[in-house]
Amino acid sequence: MQDMPPLQVESLIPEPGAARLVMTGELDYTTARDASAEVARTLAAGVDVLEFDLAGLKFIDSSGMAVVMNAYTDAEERGTAFRIVALTPYLRHLIEVVALDDVLDLPG
Amino acid sequence: MRGAAGSAGPVPDLMAALLEGSGEGIVLCDADGVVTLANAAAARMVPRVEPGLPAPAPLDSVPPSPEGRVVLHGGRAIRIRAQAVSGGMLAWYLTDLSAARRTEFLLEAGRRLSASLNPHRCARAAAELGADFLADMAIVLLPPTYRRRIEWVRAVSGRYGPEEGVLPAAEAAEVPGLSDALAGLRHGVAGQQDPGGAPGWLLPEGFGPAGHLLVLPMPGNGVPAGAIVLARRAGRPPFDDDDQVMARDLAARAGAAVSAASLFREQSTINDILTGDLLPPELPEIEGMRLAGRLRASQQAGAIGGDFYDVYLPDAAPDGGIVERPPLVILGDVCGKGAGAAVLAGQVRHSLRTLLLLECRLDRLLELLNRSLIASPSPNSYVTMILAALRTGPDDHVLVDLVVAGHPPPLVLRKDGTVEEVAARGSLLGALKEISLWPATLDLEPGEVCLLYSDGITEAFGGPSGREMYGEARLKEALATCAGMPVEALVERLEQLSTEWLGGGPGGGADDRALLAVRAGAGRTETSW
């Protein structure tokens, strides 16, 4: 095993006024704090659109789901649009289980 | 090395190095009694030993014998053994008994004080060490409790087993310097106190008057961890410099041990209180059905998980506006791990208990719970859960009213062995102001089972590769093999299969796993199967 950090968060600017966080690895109890900090930093920078690319997530637990939900509620409070632009089939299943598929903006 | 080119001849380098490194003093003299060799340890113990000169006192007074003799020289107790070697030469071997005592003390102190994570046992070990190595009596006093009482442990050399007791903090002030020592301050010269000032309770019965008294603080982890008092009887030698160094060492080590043990005890108590809120209740007998549940807590130390289940029986004598309702079982999972998760799970269970006094509609209960979670100031107050109201129907059927909030829906084991997933779903709690719920009602024939489970079961990583998720499909297959089983055996089997799956995984037992099953019918098994 390479000595990779369990979660990597890359910040991209897909278009002016938008920020895309690309998360790769494991979003769980141990990494949720780092991911939340990155979300908070991005929102504080004052973007119009916050995007999550979660296609590279190998694992997510309830703390990880909390990062997604907090991002959604925090973005809504600031009037920032929030959408998930890519995700794994398993994550889509989880989002359906918690019945957030109607609320979150998911890729078709 | 002090050597001489005498009859012994020059000592080869390697031999010289070996002798020089020995902790035992070695002196060699020729047949005329003139020293030809003395190593560093010998020169330290008997400074006047000099090659080319006659062997000095006390060496000259020790005749050859296998057991040797202990002599007091220059303030040290030295065991000296003389042995005749070839050619009329004589060798002396010297052991510094004071150094040996200190080494033994250090080893013993390390061993005994690290043997326990119980503050009281650490105090006992410290008192015994004091009595064994330093004094005729040693008493360790722990810091005063909030009720201003002081626990003490006293050991007397030569007597088996320490005594223990409790005294009011005010009485500690009677021992000179003890109040300061308990506050972390050392008094007097190196902690020495007037033995005449010692109150009667300090010394054990029949001990006689104290001649020498040391009172030392036991420094803890930022706060004083107590104090130690050492006493020697009148007529015994006073505590010398070495004794005082050892006494301070003992106090420091004992303080560290007691302090670590106290922190550990506090932490364990807090963990017990918190996990107590997560412990599943005894499942009651409910007429017309049987319940069985399993909750396996995470194996990771310090990572109390957030799975829980509970049963709310109807109020025995509903009156004064308390609603009538059927029994309710719930199974849920709060976000995160550790103390935060435990507190949140406790809040949810207690909130629900209160809400149930006034509200019996399941969807309404979840809406109210959701509001209270959103209003909660603590972050990540997310909860997924299932509420299942259990009603008995005609022909021994059980009707299960289900609402599911962000939780994997329950599974049903039918009479013919098929397994269905209940088509109930809904939003998790604590995230959205308005939640959406799609409830369902199940009709269980006698022998049919409704299974509630947490995602720790399906998300268990393990299997042959160690990295594969157990998954819903495997859980359904496993449940299908349980047809006809008593419900207790069913949950035990499902739990075992999931544990076996985890067995190969790297995070073995990393997450909580909860199972709760309801089986329609009163009997343990239905013979009609």
Image: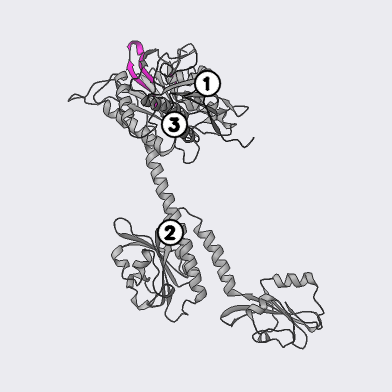
Residue at mark 2: B220
Residue at 43% over, 62% down? B219
> Tag 1: Cα neighbours inside 10 Å, few (<14), some, or many (≥20)?
some
Q: Are marks 3 and 2 in contact (CB under 8 Å)?
A: no
Q: Are marks 3 and 1 in contact (CB under 8 Å)?
A: no
Q: Which residues are magenta?
A: B383-409
Residue at 54% over, 59% down? B111
Cα separation, mark 3 vs mark 2, equals 46 Å
Q: Which mark is residue A45?
A: 3
Is residue B142 left or right of B117 when viewed as pictured? left
| Same chain assignment for discs 2 and 1 | no
Query: Quick check: B349 above or below B323?
Result: below
> Tag 3: Cα neighbours inside 10 Å, few (<14), some, or many (≥20)?
few
Chain of the residue under label 2: B
Asked which colour scheme the image uses, the reply is one colour
Q: Amino acid at mark 2?
A: Gly
Q: Secondary structure at mark 1?
A: strand
Residue at mark 1: A87
Can residue B389 be found in the magenta stretch? yes
Seen from the viewer's position, the closer of residues B428 and B315 is: B428
Residue B268 horizontal/vertical position (percent): 42, 46
Chain of the residue under label 3: A
Query: Quick check: B455 above or below B484?
Result: below
> Tag 2: Cα neighbours inside 10 Å, few (<14), some, or many (≥20)?
many
Q: Amino acid at mark 1?
A: Leu
Q: Is residue B478 visible?
A: no
Query: Quick check: B199 above or below B432?
Result: below
Residue B27 horizontal/vertical position (percent): 71, 79
Q: Are marks 2 and 1 in contact (CB under 8 Å)?
A: no
